[in-house]
Amino acid sequence: MKIGLYRYNLPFVEPIRFLDTYLPSRNGLLICKDGGWGEICPLTGFSDETIEEAEDEALTYIKHLKNGVDYFPELPSVQHGVDCMNAKFEYSEEKYKQLPPNYTLLIGSPKDITYNWFRLIDDFPHTIKIKVGRCSLKDELKMLKEICKKSPSVKMILDANGYWSKEEALSIMGFLNKDNIEYIEDPCNNLDDCEFVSQQTGIPIAFDQLVRLCPITDWGSFTNLKAILIKPSIIGGKQVCQAIRKHAETFNIKVVASSSFESQLGNYNIRTIASNWPYKDVYHGLDTNKYFKYSIFKKDSFEINFNLLSTIYEYED
């Protein structure tokens, strides 16, 4: 058996804002056993565990593995990383082309988002996801209207991350054309306000971070709950994700695989997981690779670039 645990730090093209934190780079861990790779990367401000706690549990897992003792990780990010490692996913160009598509993600200031949208010229994607709630309502509403004017048939997924108050959400959602909105993720930071603004505006909502605050048995009580987003690095391993997915199906709620800005390896793993879900018309939220300066893979390949890793632990018997 050959097993290793490694650390990476991948800089973003520009610092990215997560809640009240600006991150210039993404820290994470890669765990490998006999050619199978997993990624362990809690996201600051969203995950319950820190990267240090995840590293400690990953080392505990390896210790038990060496001694032939079963150990089930408790931390969501470690559960997910270990599951991917044990699955031994195939990494190849041919396999990558078979993986499900993702929608285009636009982040930054309203000016940056509008500029990047117009750069697409006439080859506009049908569905896009836009991070909102970071700037003034006036500037963001102007941005959204300009995008719709340039591409009237566009379907927008707006990700507010709970930044809007109930009053702010009502204000901006009331000015939007419902035909251009696929859904809004976590428009407010509590379930009751999300339900209220959705009822008042008729615009569908989706739960991302709020899914952890909403008991599965309550999903059917929300009038316009259209999607549940699953971030495996935050939610947990395959058993947790499968339970969420199966329950969502009973309410005819679509399930979308979503990124926590994992490395290119972690992104690949989530897309591989989503490829096994029984949905053919779902675009997933995994368009994050373009925001990194470097790839964890070697150029023009799907081989790990060890020059970007620092070794925490290696073992071979």
Image: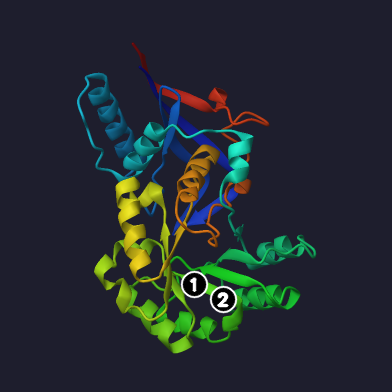
In the depicted structure, whether residue 44 falls above or below residue 19: above
Q: Is residue 197 found left or right of 91 in the rendered image?
A: left
Could you say which quadrant of the image residue 46 lies in?
bottom left
Picture quarter with the C terminus: top left
Instruction: Name which residue lies at 66% across and 63% down.
Output: 113
Which image quadrant: the N terminus?
top left
Q: Which residue is mark 2?
A: 181
Residue 184: image tag: 1
State the separation of the CA atoms marked 1 and 2.
7 Å
- Residue at the (47%, 46%) spot, across then down: 270
In the image, residue 51 sits, relative to residue 132, either above or below, namely: above
Q: Quadrant of residue 161?
A: bottom left
Residue appearing at x 53%, y 86% in the figure: 174
* Between 93 and 161, the one nearer to me in the picture: 93
Amino acid at circle 1: Ile
Tell me if residue 176 can be seen.
no
Q: Secondary structure at mark 2?
A: strand
Dots 1, 2 in contact, CB < 8 A? yes
